[in-house]
Amino acid sequence: MTHQEIYRSGPWWHYIKYGIVGIIFGIVFTKAEIISWFRIQEMFRLESFHMYGVIGSAVATGLISVLLIKKFNIKTVSGEEINFYPKTFNKGQVYGGLLFGFGWAMTGACPGPLFAQIGTGATVIIISLLSAITGTWVYGYFREKLPH
């Protein structure tokens, strides 16, 4: 699949499926209490196993899914081949991971749950969302000058 094929546009109703998946994702996050600021603080204070169990389950599910996709050569719903490309490690990932963790600990939010938190009425999280968008833009602007 080429870069242009990934970003091809389609009719507006083509994107409804992504909205439905996002809503289901938000409901699961809310019911699992992983959008709770208190649960996140428990995790960073090493006071509860709840978040580690959820994250570990997600990692195990992803691992098993990738293994099954590779073993059975599973394709997308539209019949496209799924490709996995090797990643190279660099020290910038450590710095980025630390910044991500500090931001997560301070705000009680990471990119996935941000929208679910706003959806539950925690409108103060809009500040975290705007900060995340700004951080992404700043990274993109300075990317070539950062250690990789």
Image (spheres, rainbow, N blue to C red):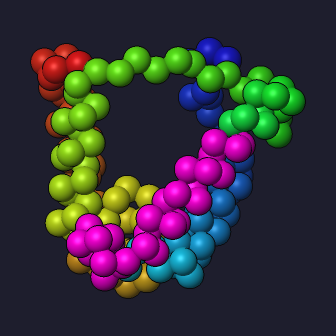
- The one nearer the camera, 119 or 8, is 119
* 25 left or right, relative to 103: right
Residue 42 horizontal/vertical position (percent): 30, 77
The N terminus, quarter of image: top right
Q: Is residue 23 visible?
A: no
Residue sitting at x 59%, y 73%: 28
Say if 80 sits above or below 26 in the image.
above
Question: Across the whole image, how many numbered discs are drawn on residues?
Answer: 0
Residue sitting at x 51%, y 67%: 53
Q: Main secondary structure of the magenta part?
A: helix
Say if 132 sits above or below 128 in the image.
above
Residue 98 horizontal/vertical position (percent): 21, 45
Magenta residues (range):
37-65
Quick check: is 86 in the magenta stretch?
A: no
Dividing the picture into quadrants, the one containing residue 45 is: bottom left
Q: Is residue 1 visible?
A: yes
Quick check: is 44 in the magenta stretch?
A: yes
Residue sitting at x 19%, y 36%: 95
* 63 left or right, relative to 79: left
The C terminus, quarter of image: top left
Residue sitting at x 77%, y 33%: 69
